Image (cartoon, rainbow, N blue to C red):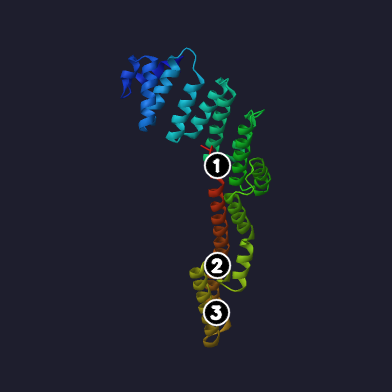
C-alpha cells in the first residue's frame, strides 16, 4: 500500500504531472507518442501509471512497457515485463512473439543459457513458422555461447527444414566456419616460441611479427656481445631477463593474433547467419 502511495506522489511531482489528470486512453496516447519520439523515460512513466490505474492490465500494456525498458537499456526490467505480458497473453502467436523478444533481450546481455531456456516456452505445435524461428534463435544462442558443436547440429536442421542448402549465404557461412576451425592459436604460439615472430606472420600480422623477430635477434646479439666483452654471468644477469620478457610477450601476441583472426571469421559467419531468417526482429 505504501508503495502505491509513493508511486502516485512521484507521478504527481514529475515534470509532466499533467498526466495525473489524464484519462487512461490519453495516457496510452501520450506514452505511445513519447516512445515514438524516443523519450523512453516518459513512456515508461506513462505506461507505469496506466498499469496502476487500469482495472486489469492487458498483455499489450506490459509488452509496450517492456519495449520501453528495452529501448532505455534496462534489460532486466524489460525481461520482467515480457514475462508479465506472456503470462497474460492468450493468443498463441502473440505469446510466441513475446517470448522471442524476451530471448533477444537475454542474448543482448549475454545470458545465453537463459535465452535457450526461454525458448522452451514456445508453442510450435502445428506452427511451422514458430518451429523454424525457434530453431534459428536457438542456433544463434549456441553460436554466441561458442558451443559450435550444438550450433552446427541445430543450424543444420534449420537449413534442411528451410530448404536453404543451396543458399549462397549458407555456403559463405560454411566457408567462414571452416576457416575459423583451421586457425590454431596454440600452433601460432609455439611457432613464435621457437622462431620469434613466425606465429604472428602466419596469421597476417606482419608488422608485429617482423618487429618481434628483429627485437629478439637484437637481444640475442647483445647477449653474446656481453659474454664476449664481459662474462657469461653478466650476459645472463643483464640481457637475458629482457629477452625473456619480450620473447614471452611475442609468443603470447602470436596466440592473440590467431584468436583475433578466428573471431574475425566467426563474426563474418554470424553476419551471414543474421541474413538467413528475415523475421529475426
- Between 274 and 257, the one lying in front of the other is 274
Residue where numbered disc 3 is placed: 220
Q: Are marks 2 and 1 in contact (CB under 8 Å)?
A: no
Whether residue 162 is situated above or below residue 205 in the rendered picture: above
Q: Are marks 3 and 2 in contact (CB under 8 Å)?
A: no
Q: Is residue 41 left or right of residue 149?
A: left
Q: Percent from the top left, x then y, of residue 126?
A: 66, 28
Residue where numbered disc 2 is placed: 200
Quarter-of-image position of residue 133: top right
Kindly identify which numbered label has been placed on residue 110: 1
- Mark 3–mark 2 Cα distance, whole angstroms, equals 20 Å
Q: Please tell me whether mark 2 sits on a helix, a strand or a loop.
A: helix
- Mark 2–mark 1 Cα distance, whole angstroms, equals 30 Å
Q: Residue at x 49, y 14 (%)?
A: 56
Q: Residue at x 51, y 70 (%)?
A: 206
Q: Please tell me whether mark 1 sits on a helix, a strand or a loop.
A: loop
* Mark 1, other Cα within 10 Å: few <14 / some 14–19 / many ≥20: some
Disc 3 or 2, which lies upstream in sequence?
A: 2
Q: Please tell me whether mark 3 sits on a helix, a strand or a loop.
A: helix
Disc 2 or 1, which lies upstream in sequence?
A: 1
Q: Is residue 27 left or right of residue 224?
A: left
Whether residue 256 is situated above or below residue 214 in the rendered picture: above
Residue furthest out toward the top: 55
Amino acid at each position: 500500500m505504501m508503495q502505491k502511495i509513493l508511486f502516485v506522489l512521484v507521478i504527481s511531482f514529475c515534470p509532466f504531472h499533467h498526466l495525473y489528470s489524464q484519462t487512461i486512453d490519453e495516457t496510452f496516447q501520450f506514452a505511445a507518442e513519447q516512445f515514438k519520439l524516443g523519450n523512453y523515460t516518459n513512456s515508461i512513466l506513462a505506461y507505469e501509471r496506466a498499469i496502476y490505474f487500469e482495472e486489469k492490465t492487458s498483455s499489450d500494456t506490459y509488452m509496450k512497457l517492456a519495449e520501453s525498458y528495452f529501448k532505455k537499456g534496462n534489460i532486466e526490467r524489460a525481461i520482467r515485463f515480457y514475462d508479465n505480458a506472456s503470462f497474460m497473453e492468450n493468443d498463441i502467436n502473440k505469446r510466441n512473439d513475446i517470448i522471442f523478444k524476451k530471448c533477444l533481450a537475454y542474448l543482448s546481455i549475454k545470458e545465453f543459457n537463459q535465452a535457450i531456456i526461454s525458448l522452451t516456452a514456445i508453442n510450435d505445435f502445428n506452427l511451422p513458422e514458430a518451429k523454424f524461428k525457434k530453431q534459428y534463435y536457438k542456433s544463434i544462442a549456441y553460436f554466441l555461447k561458442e558451443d559450435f558443436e550444438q550450433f552446427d547440429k541445430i543450424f543444420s536442421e534449420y537449413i534442411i527444414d528451410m530448404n536453404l542448402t543451396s543458399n549462397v549465404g549458407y555456403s559463405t557461412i560454411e566457408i567462414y566456419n571452416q576457416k575459423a576451425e583451421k586457425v590454431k592459436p596454440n600452433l601460432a604460439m609455439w611457432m613464435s616460441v621457437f622462431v620469434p615472430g613466425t606465429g604472428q606472420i602466419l596469421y597476417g600480422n606482419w608488422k608485429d611479427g617482423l618487429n618481434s623477430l628483429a627485437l629478439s635477434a637484437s637481444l640475442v646479439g647483445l647477449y653474446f656481445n656481453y659474454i664476449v666483452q664481459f662474462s657469461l654471468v653478466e650476459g645472463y644477469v643483464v640481457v637475458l631477463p629482457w629477452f625473456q620478457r619480450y620473447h614471452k610477450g611475442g609468443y603470447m601476441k602470436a596466440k592473440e593474433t590467431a584468436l583475433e583472426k578466428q573471431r574475425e571469421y566467426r563474426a563474418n559467419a554470424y553476419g551471414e547467419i543474421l541474413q538467413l531468417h528475415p523475421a529475426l526482429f
